[in-house]
Amino acid sequence: MVERERIAADAFDRFVRELSADSPAFTVIPLDSQIASVLRRIPRHLVPEMPDRIIAATALHLDLPLVTRDRQLQAAGIQTIWKPNLKCLPFPKPEPRVPGSFSRASSARVTTSL
């Protein structure tokens, strides 16, 4: 996505930093046997890419909609949320640090209202 200029070049690093925060805005869901069994409900001919099927199966297992405009996932009957003019807010820029000092920027949460 960086190569296609859909996200900022440092987005992954900011995402990793957010995951290590005391109260992260994101939760990592491991791929387990329950999610793997839900993969059977995602038609391969409609969603040919395995990563997309895994994401869809995770959403189905957790009973959550996906925020995507992917027409293949929509055609497969996956509940999706998409607003064409939805703008993602950037992560806050980290505060500059003075060498040898410790400072922790206030934690920020990513929130949207639909």
Image (cartoon, rainbow, N blue to C red):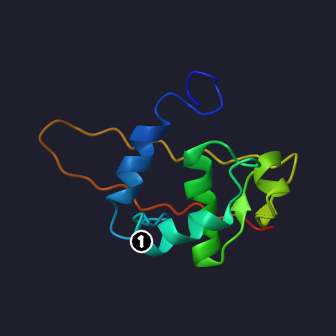
Quadrant assignment for the C terminus: bottom right
| Left or right side of 99 for 88 | right
Q: Which residue is mark 1?
A: 33
Residue 53 seen in the current view: yes
Mark 1: amino acid:
Ser
Q: Is residue 51 above or below residue 9?
A: below
Which residue reaches farthest right?
84
Secondary structure found at label 1:
helix
Q: Viewer-proximal residue, 37 or 24? A: 37
Q: Viewer-proximal residue, 86 or 63? A: 63
**Residue 78 x/y as whole percent:** 76, 64
Q: Is residue 8 above or below residue 97?
A: above
**Residue 3 x/y as whole percent:** 57, 21
**Residue 62 x/y as whole percent:** 58, 76
| Left or right side of 26 for 102 | left
Residue 69 seen in the current view: no
Q: Identify the residue shown where x is 42% and y is 65%.
A: 24
